[in-house]
Image: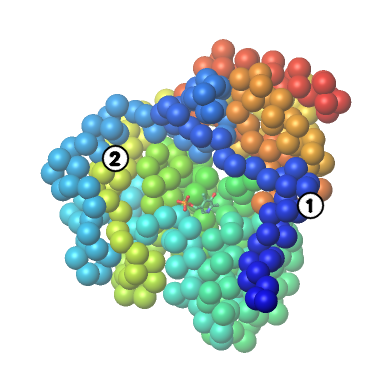
Amino acid sequence: MRTDPLRHVAQELGALRAQGRFRWPRELQSAQAPRAVYDGRLVVNLCSNNYLALADDPRLKEAAKAAVDRYGTGSGAVRTIAGSLQLHRELEEALARFKGTEATLLYPSGFAANAGTVAALLGPEDVVVSDELNHASIIDGCRLSGAVKRIYRHRDTEHARELLEASQDARLVLLVTDGVFSMDGDVAPLPELCALAKRYGALLMVDDAHATGVLGRGGRGTVDHFGLAGQVDIQVGTLSKALATVGGYVAASRSLVEYLMHRARPVLFSTSLPPAVAGAALRALQILEQEPERLERLWDNTRTFKRGLEQLGFRTGQSETPITPVLTGDEDLAMALSDGLFEEGVFALGISYPTVPRGQARVRTIVTAGHTQQDLDFALGAFERVGRRLGLI
Ligand SMILES: *Cc1c(COP(=O)(O)O)cnc(C)c1O
Protein backbone atom coordinates (compact mmCIF):
# COMPACT_ATOMS: atom_id res chain seq x y z
CA MET A 1 0.00 0.00 0.00
CA ARG A 2 1.20 3.54 -0.81
CA THR A 3 2.07 5.50 2.31
CA ASP A 4 0.64 9.00 2.60
CA PRO A 5 3.04 11.31 0.72
CA LEU A 6 1.92 14.19 2.95
CA ARG A 7 2.68 12.38 6.22
CA HIS A 8 5.00 15.17 7.38
CA VAL A 9 2.25 17.74 6.76
CA ALA A 10 -0.23 15.80 8.88
CA GLN A 11 2.40 15.37 11.59
CA GLU A 12 3.19 19.09 11.66
CA LEU A 13 -0.51 20.02 11.82
CA GLY A 14 -1.04 17.48 14.58
CA ALA A 15 1.85 18.91 16.55
CA LEU A 16 0.54 22.47 16.14
CA ARG A 17 -2.87 21.40 17.42
CA ALA A 18 -1.39 19.44 20.32
CA GLN A 19 0.64 22.47 21.40
CA GLY A 20 -2.32 24.83 21.08
CA ARG A 21 -0.48 26.66 18.27
CA PHE A 22 -2.96 26.00 15.50
CA ARG A 23 -4.53 29.35 14.61
CA TRP A 24 -6.62 30.63 11.79
CA PRO A 25 -6.41 34.40 11.22
CA ARG A 26 -9.20 36.54 12.56
CA GLU A 27 -11.41 37.91 9.82
CA LEU A 28 -11.57 41.65 9.12
CA GLN A 29 -15.17 42.65 8.45
CA SER A 30 -14.81 46.42 8.16
CA ALA A 31 -12.29 48.85 6.70
CA GLN A 32 -8.74 48.48 8.01
CA ALA A 33 -9.00 51.26 10.61
CA PRO A 34 -7.82 52.14 14.14
CA ARG A 35 -11.13 50.72 15.35
CA ALA A 36 -12.15 47.80 13.20
CA VAL A 37 -14.45 44.79 13.25
CA TYR A 38 -12.71 41.41 13.51
CA ASP A 39 -14.70 38.21 13.94
CA GLY A 40 -17.86 40.22 14.53
CA ARG A 41 -16.34 42.36 17.26
CA LEU A 42 -15.47 46.07 17.20
CA VAL A 43 -11.96 46.35 18.64
CA VAL A 44 -9.18 48.87 19.09
CA ASN A 45 -6.81 47.62 16.42
CA LEU A 46 -3.16 47.42 17.45
CA CYS A 47 -2.19 44.90 14.78
CA SER A 48 -2.04 46.69 11.47
CA ASN A 49 0.81 48.43 9.66
CA ASN A 50 -1.60 51.18 8.67
CA TYR A 51 0.70 53.73 10.40
CA LEU A 52 -0.83 56.87 8.96
CA ALA A 53 -4.43 55.59 9.02
CA LEU A 54 -4.70 56.08 5.27
CA ALA A 55 -6.17 52.66 4.43
CA ASP A 56 -9.75 53.98 4.49
CA ASP A 57 -8.99 57.60 3.60
CA PRO A 58 -11.69 58.94 1.24
CA ARG A 59 -9.05 60.59 -0.98
CA LEU A 60 -7.22 57.30 -1.55
CA LYS A 61 -10.51 55.60 -2.34
CA GLU A 62 -11.33 58.34 -4.85
CA ALA A 63 -7.91 57.99 -6.46
CA ALA A 64 -8.33 54.22 -6.73
CA LYS A 65 -11.79 54.62 -8.29
CA ALA A 66 -10.56 57.24 -10.76
CA ALA A 67 -7.73 54.91 -11.82
CA VAL A 68 -10.19 52.04 -12.30
CA ASP A 69 -12.53 54.23 -14.34
CA ARG A 70 -9.74 55.33 -16.62
CA TYR A 71 -7.51 52.23 -16.84
CA GLY A 72 -9.64 49.28 -15.67
CA THR A 73 -8.91 46.68 -13.05
CA GLY A 74 -5.87 44.68 -14.13
CA SER A 75 -2.60 45.67 -15.78
CA GLY A 76 -2.83 42.58 -17.95
CA ALA A 77 0.85 41.67 -18.13
CA VAL A 78 4.26 41.85 -16.49
CA ARG A 79 6.16 45.15 -16.67
CA THR A 80 8.52 44.00 -19.40
CA ILE A 81 5.84 42.81 -21.80
CA ALA A 82 2.73 44.98 -21.92
CA GLY A 83 2.07 45.92 -18.30
CA SER A 84 4.12 49.12 -17.89
CA LEU A 85 1.49 51.74 -17.13
CA GLN A 86 1.80 55.49 -17.28
CA LEU A 87 0.72 55.41 -13.60
CA HIS A 88 3.72 53.18 -12.77
CA ARG A 89 6.11 55.73 -14.25
CA GLU A 90 4.41 58.59 -12.38
CA LEU A 91 4.56 56.65 -9.13
CA GLU A 92 8.22 55.70 -9.67
CA GLU A 93 9.11 59.34 -10.32
CA ALA A 94 7.24 60.45 -7.19
CA LEU A 95 8.94 57.77 -5.09
CA ALA A 96 12.37 58.76 -6.43
CA ARG A 97 11.73 62.40 -5.44
CA PHE A 98 10.51 61.25 -2.03
CA LYS A 99 13.51 58.99 -1.42
CA GLY A 100 16.02 61.37 -2.98
CA THR A 101 17.41 58.82 -5.45
CA GLU A 102 17.93 58.90 -9.21
CA ALA A 103 15.31 56.27 -9.87
CA THR A 104 12.98 53.67 -8.39
CA LEU A 105 11.50 50.43 -9.66
CA LEU A 106 8.16 48.98 -8.57
CA TYR A 107 7.76 45.31 -7.67
CA PRO A 108 4.57 43.32 -6.99
CA SER A 109 5.34 43.37 -3.24
CA GLY A 110 7.98 44.35 -0.72
CA PHE A 111 8.76 40.66 -0.34
CA ALA A 112 9.42 40.40 -4.07
CA ALA A 113 11.50 43.59 -4.02
CA ASN A 114 13.86 42.20 -1.38
CA ALA A 115 14.09 38.65 -2.64
CA GLY A 116 14.20 39.62 -6.30
CA THR A 117 16.81 42.33 -5.89
CA VAL A 118 19.23 40.30 -3.79
CA ALA A 119 18.86 37.29 -6.11
CA ALA A 120 19.42 39.44 -9.21
CA LEU A 121 22.56 41.12 -7.89
CA LEU A 122 24.42 38.25 -6.23
CA GLY A 123 25.70 34.89 -7.35
CA PRO A 124 27.74 32.07 -5.81
CA GLU A 125 30.96 34.11 -6.19
CA ASP A 126 29.55 36.84 -3.91
CA VAL A 127 29.05 37.28 -0.17
CA VAL A 128 26.11 38.69 1.73
CA VAL A 129 26.63 40.03 5.25
CA SER A 130 23.22 40.14 6.92
CA ASP A 131 21.71 40.96 10.35
CA GLU A 132 20.33 37.83 12.05
CA LEU A 133 16.90 39.45 12.45
CA ASN A 134 16.50 40.60 8.85
CA HIS A 135 13.13 40.02 7.21
CA ALA A 136 12.36 36.59 5.71
CA SER A 137 12.29 38.07 2.19
CA ILE A 138 15.94 39.14 2.50
CA ILE A 139 16.84 35.69 3.78
CA ASP A 140 15.02 34.04 0.88
CA GLY A 141 16.78 36.36 -1.57
CA CYS A 142 20.13 35.32 -0.12
CA ARG A 143 19.21 31.65 -0.50
CA LEU A 144 18.02 32.13 -4.08
CA SER A 145 21.18 33.98 -5.05
CA GLY A 146 23.47 31.14 -3.98
CA ALA A 147 25.82 33.72 -2.41
CA VAL A 148 27.87 32.85 0.66
CA LYS A 149 25.85 33.95 3.70
CA ARG A 150 27.56 35.52 6.72
CA ILE A 151 25.10 36.42 9.48
CA TYR A 152 26.03 38.93 12.18
CA ARG A 153 24.49 39.16 15.63
CA HIS A 154 21.59 41.58 15.78
CA ARG A 155 22.83 45.18 15.36
CA ASP A 156 26.36 44.08 16.30
CA THR A 157 28.54 46.25 14.06
CA GLU A 158 31.81 44.81 15.38
CA HIS A 159 30.62 41.36 14.33
CA ALA A 160 29.58 42.76 10.93
CA ARG A 161 33.06 44.27 10.59
CA GLU A 162 34.73 40.92 11.25
CA LEU A 163 32.58 39.25 8.61
CA LEU A 164 33.34 42.00 6.09
CA GLU A 165 37.04 41.68 6.88
CA ALA A 166 36.82 37.96 6.11
CA SER A 167 35.00 38.55 2.80
CA GLN A 168 37.50 40.61 0.87
CA ASP A 169 38.12 38.04 -1.85
CA ALA A 170 34.52 38.03 -3.05
CA ARG A 171 33.47 39.63 -6.36
CA LEU A 172 30.78 41.63 -4.55
CA VAL A 173 29.88 41.96 -0.88
CA LEU A 174 26.36 43.07 0.02
CA LEU A 175 25.80 44.44 3.53
CA VAL A 176 22.08 44.29 4.19
CA THR A 177 19.81 45.29 7.07
CA ASP A 178 16.23 46.07 7.91
CA GLY A 179 15.88 49.80 8.67
CA VAL A 180 13.32 49.16 11.41
CA PHE A 181 13.11 45.57 12.65
CA SER A 182 9.56 44.41 12.28
CA MET A 183 9.14 42.33 15.44
CA ASP A 184 11.15 44.49 17.88
CA GLY A 185 10.73 48.01 16.55
CA ASP A 186 14.40 48.85 16.99
CA VAL A 187 16.41 50.74 14.38
CA ALA A 188 19.50 49.58 12.47
CA PRO A 189 22.83 51.28 13.31
CA LEU A 190 22.91 52.72 9.81
CA PRO A 191 25.69 55.34 10.23
CA GLU A 192 28.10 52.64 11.44
CA LEU A 193 27.02 50.21 8.72
CA CYS A 194 27.48 52.96 6.15
CA ALA A 195 31.03 53.61 7.34
CA LEU A 196 31.77 49.87 7.24
CA ALA A 197 30.38 49.53 3.72
CA LYS A 198 32.65 52.36 2.55
CA ARG A 199 35.69 51.00 4.33
CA TYR A 200 35.30 47.50 2.88
CA GLY A 201 33.91 48.47 -0.52
CA ALA A 202 30.60 46.68 0.14
CA LEU A 203 27.23 47.55 -1.36
CA LEU A 204 24.78 48.71 1.32
CA MET A 205 21.08 47.83 1.20
CA VAL A 206 18.43 48.85 3.73
CA ASP A 207 14.87 47.54 3.87
CA ASP A 208 12.69 50.42 5.03
CA ALA A 209 9.32 48.64 4.97
CA HIS A 210 8.52 49.81 8.52
CA ALA A 211 10.41 53.11 8.29
CA THR A 212 8.78 54.68 5.26
CA GLY A 213 6.04 57.07 6.37
CA VAL A 214 7.35 56.68 9.92
CA LEU A 215 10.98 57.83 10.33
CA GLY A 216 12.91 60.74 8.82
CA ARG A 217 11.68 64.10 7.57
CA GLY A 218 8.20 63.66 6.15
CA GLY A 219 8.52 59.89 6.66
CA ARG A 220 11.36 59.51 4.14
CA GLY A 221 12.87 56.60 6.05
CA THR A 222 16.00 55.67 7.97
CA VAL A 223 18.47 57.09 5.44
CA ASP A 224 16.93 60.52 5.91
CA HIS A 225 16.54 59.96 9.67
CA PHE A 226 20.31 59.54 10.00
CA GLY A 227 21.20 62.23 7.43
CA LEU A 228 22.83 59.68 5.10
CA ALA A 229 21.41 60.94 1.79
CA GLY A 230 23.39 59.59 -1.16
CA GLN A 231 25.32 57.09 0.97
CA VAL A 232 23.08 54.02 0.87
CA ASP A 233 23.17 52.17 -2.45
CA ILE A 234 19.79 50.44 -2.29
CA GLN A 235 16.69 51.41 -0.34
CA VAL A 236 13.83 48.92 -0.47
CA GLY A 237 10.38 50.02 0.53
CA THR A 238 6.82 48.87 0.50
CA LEU A 239 3.56 50.55 -0.45
CA SER A 240 1.75 48.04 1.77
CA LYS A 241 2.27 49.64 5.18
CA ALA A 242 2.15 53.42 5.77
CA LEU A 243 1.22 53.98 2.12
CA ALA A 244 -1.89 51.87 2.62
CA THR A 245 -1.99 49.87 -0.61
CA VAL A 246 0.25 47.01 -1.76
CA GLY A 247 3.50 46.64 -3.70
CA GLY A 248 7.21 47.16 -3.21
CA TYR A 249 9.96 49.27 -4.72
CA VAL A 250 13.70 49.69 -4.94
CA ALA A 251 15.16 53.21 -4.81
CA ALA A 252 18.68 53.37 -6.19
CA SER A 253 20.88 54.72 -8.97
CA ARG A 254 19.48 54.81 -12.49
CA SER A 255 21.87 52.14 -13.70
CA LEU A 256 20.91 49.77 -10.91
CA VAL A 257 17.22 50.28 -11.69
CA GLU A 258 17.94 49.70 -15.39
CA TYR A 259 19.70 46.45 -14.54
CA LEU A 260 16.89 45.26 -12.27
CA MET A 261 14.27 46.01 -14.94
CA HIS A 262 16.11 43.46 -17.11
CA ARG A 263 17.13 40.90 -14.50
CA ALA A 264 14.89 40.91 -11.40
CA ARG A 265 12.66 37.88 -11.73
CA PRO A 266 9.58 39.27 -9.95
CA VAL A 267 9.65 42.17 -12.44
CA LEU A 268 10.06 39.83 -15.40
CA PHE A 269 7.66 37.10 -14.33
CA SER A 270 4.94 38.58 -12.09
CA THR A 271 2.14 40.84 -13.27
CA SER A 272 2.60 44.51 -12.48
CA LEU A 273 0.58 46.48 -9.93
CA PRO A 274 -3.02 47.19 -10.92
CA PRO A 275 -4.09 50.77 -11.74
CA ALA A 276 -6.14 51.22 -8.53
CA VAL A 277 -3.10 50.47 -6.39
CA ALA A 278 -0.76 52.77 -8.30
CA GLY A 279 -3.32 55.59 -8.29
CA ALA A 280 -4.04 55.29 -4.57
CA ALA A 281 -0.34 55.03 -3.65
CA LEU A 282 0.42 58.21 -5.61
CA ARG A 283 -2.30 59.98 -3.64
CA ALA A 284 -0.92 58.61 -0.36
CA LEU A 285 2.50 60.09 -1.15
CA GLN A 286 0.92 63.49 -1.83
CA ILE A 287 -0.97 63.38 1.46
CA LEU A 288 2.20 62.47 3.29
CA GLU A 289 3.83 65.62 1.92
CA GLN A 290 0.82 67.86 2.55
CA GLU A 291 -0.06 66.66 6.05
CA PRO A 292 3.05 66.39 8.22
CA GLU A 293 0.74 66.54 11.25
CA ARG A 294 -0.11 62.88 10.59
CA LEU A 295 3.45 61.92 11.48
CA GLU A 296 3.32 64.06 14.59
CA ARG A 297 0.17 62.28 15.73
CA LEU A 298 1.79 58.92 15.04
CA TRP A 299 4.77 59.83 17.23
CA ASP A 300 2.64 61.43 19.96
CA ASN A 301 0.59 58.24 20.12
CA THR A 302 3.75 56.13 20.09
CA ARG A 303 5.21 57.99 23.08
CA THR A 304 1.92 57.92 25.01
CA PHE A 305 1.34 54.23 24.49
CA LYS A 306 4.92 53.12 25.19
CA ARG A 307 5.04 55.19 28.36
CA GLY A 308 1.69 53.73 29.45
CA LEU A 309 2.86 50.14 28.97
CA GLU A 310 6.14 50.82 30.77
CA GLN A 311 4.38 52.51 33.69
CA LEU A 312 2.17 49.45 34.03
CA GLY A 313 5.35 47.40 34.38
CA PHE A 314 5.40 45.49 31.09
CA ARG A 315 8.69 44.57 29.42
CA THR A 316 8.78 46.37 26.07
CA GLY A 317 12.31 45.69 24.80
CA GLN A 318 14.46 48.13 22.81
CA SER A 319 11.82 49.60 20.52
CA GLU A 320 12.33 53.13 19.21
CA THR A 321 9.36 53.21 16.83
CA PRO A 322 5.55 52.73 16.82
CA ILE A 323 6.12 48.95 16.99
CA THR A 324 6.12 48.04 20.68
CA PRO A 325 6.48 44.40 21.68
CA VAL A 326 5.06 43.35 25.04
CA LEU A 327 7.44 40.54 25.92
CA THR A 328 6.19 37.49 27.76
CA GLY A 329 8.96 35.05 26.82
CA ASP A 330 6.61 32.14 27.27
CA GLU A 331 4.51 31.24 24.21
CA ASP A 332 1.39 30.19 26.12
CA LEU A 333 1.42 33.46 28.03
CA ALA A 334 1.70 35.47 24.82
CA MET A 335 -1.33 33.66 23.37
CA ALA A 336 -3.29 34.02 26.62
CA LEU A 337 -2.52 37.75 26.74
CA SER A 338 -3.63 38.21 23.15
CA ASP A 339 -6.83 36.20 23.65
CA GLY A 340 -7.64 38.03 26.91
CA LEU A 341 -7.14 41.39 25.24
CA PHE A 342 -9.48 40.44 22.40
CA GLU A 343 -12.15 39.54 24.95
CA GLU A 344 -11.72 43.06 26.32
CA GLY A 345 -12.05 44.65 22.87
CA VAL A 346 -8.37 45.08 21.95
CA PHE A 347 -6.70 43.30 19.05
CA ALA A 348 -2.96 42.70 19.53
CA LEU A 349 -1.54 39.48 18.16
CA GLY A 350 0.60 36.98 20.02
CA ILE A 351 3.78 36.14 18.11
CA SER A 352 5.94 33.11 18.73
CA TYR A 353 8.50 30.85 17.07
CA PRO A 354 9.36 30.74 14.15
CA THR A 355 8.45 34.40 13.59
CA VAL A 356 10.60 35.32 16.61
CA PRO A 357 13.33 33.21 18.28
CA ARG A 358 12.28 30.62 20.87
CA GLY A 359 11.83 32.06 24.36
CA GLN A 360 11.06 35.52 22.97
CA ALA A 361 7.32 35.25 22.49
CA ARG A 362 5.45 38.50 22.70
CA VAL A 363 2.30 40.40 21.94
CA ARG A 364 3.22 42.93 19.29
CA THR A 365 1.47 46.29 19.24
CA ILE A 366 1.49 49.01 16.59
CA VAL A 367 -0.22 52.33 17.17
CA THR A 368 -1.25 54.53 14.26
CA ALA A 369 -1.84 58.23 13.65
CA GLY A 370 -5.56 57.49 13.74
CA HIS A 371 -5.84 56.24 17.32
CA THR A 372 -7.43 58.71 19.73
CA GLN A 373 -6.34 59.28 23.32
CA GLN A 374 -9.52 57.43 24.28
CA ASP A 375 -8.48 54.40 22.17
CA LEU A 376 -5.07 54.31 23.83
CA ASP A 377 -6.51 54.66 27.34
CA PHE A 378 -8.99 51.91 26.58
CA ALA A 379 -6.20 49.62 25.33
CA LEU A 380 -3.96 50.36 28.32
CA GLY A 381 -6.86 49.56 30.67
CA ALA A 382 -7.28 46.19 28.98
CA PHE A 383 -3.54 45.49 29.15
CA GLU A 384 -3.58 46.28 32.85
CA ARG A 385 -6.48 43.96 33.68
CA VAL A 386 -5.32 41.02 31.57
CA GLY A 387 -1.67 41.52 32.51
CA ARG A 388 -2.55 41.40 36.23
CA ARG A 389 -4.70 38.34 35.80
CA LEU A 390 -1.86 36.51 34.04
CA GLY A 391 0.73 37.65 36.57
CA LEU A 392 2.73 39.58 33.97
CA ILE A 393 2.64 42.78 36.01
C1 LIG B 1 6.29 43.76 5.54
C2 LIG B 1 7.74 43.67 5.27
C3 LIG B 1 8.20 43.32 4.01
C4 LIG B 1 7.28 42.82 2.93
O1 LIG B 1 6.54 43.85 2.35
P1 LIG B 1 5.19 43.45 1.57
O2 LIG B 1 4.94 44.64 0.72
O3 LIG B 1 4.16 43.22 2.60
O4 LIG B 1 5.48 42.22 0.77
C5 LIG B 1 9.57 43.35 3.78
N1 LIG B 1 10.43 43.70 4.76
C6 LIG B 1 10.02 44.03 6.00
C7 LIG B 1 11.01 44.41 7.03
C8 LIG B 1 8.66 44.01 6.29
O5 LIG B 1 8.26 44.29 7.52
Asked if residue 133 is positioned above or below residue 287 in the image, the reply reads: below
Q: Is residue 223 left or right of residue 251?
A: right
Are the residues flagged by discs 1 and 2 in contact, CB closer than 8 Å?
Answer: no
Where on the picture, by quarter, is residue 325? top right
Asked if residue 20 is positioned above or below residue 377 in the image, the reply reads: below
Residue 111 in view in this figure: yes
> From this viewpoint, which residue is outermost toward the front?
1
Q: Which quadrant of the figure contains the C terminus?
A: top right
Residue at x 82% of width, y 41% of height: 330
Q: Which quadrant of the figure contains the N terminus?
A: bottom right
Q: How many marks?
A: 2
Residue 317 in view in this figure: no
Image coordinates for residue 73, horizontal then vertical, percent: 22, 47
Look at mark 2 in the image and give the residue it sits on. 280
Asked if residue 174 is positioned above or below residue 246 in the image, the reply reads: below
Task: Answer few, some or many: residues within 10 Å of disc 2's Cα (few below 14, many 20 plus, some between 14 and 19).
Answer: many
Q: Secondary structure at mark 1?
A: loop
Where on the picture, by quarter, is residue 362? top right
**What amino acid type is highlighted by mark number 2?**
Ala
**What amino acid type is highlighted by mark number 1?**
Arg
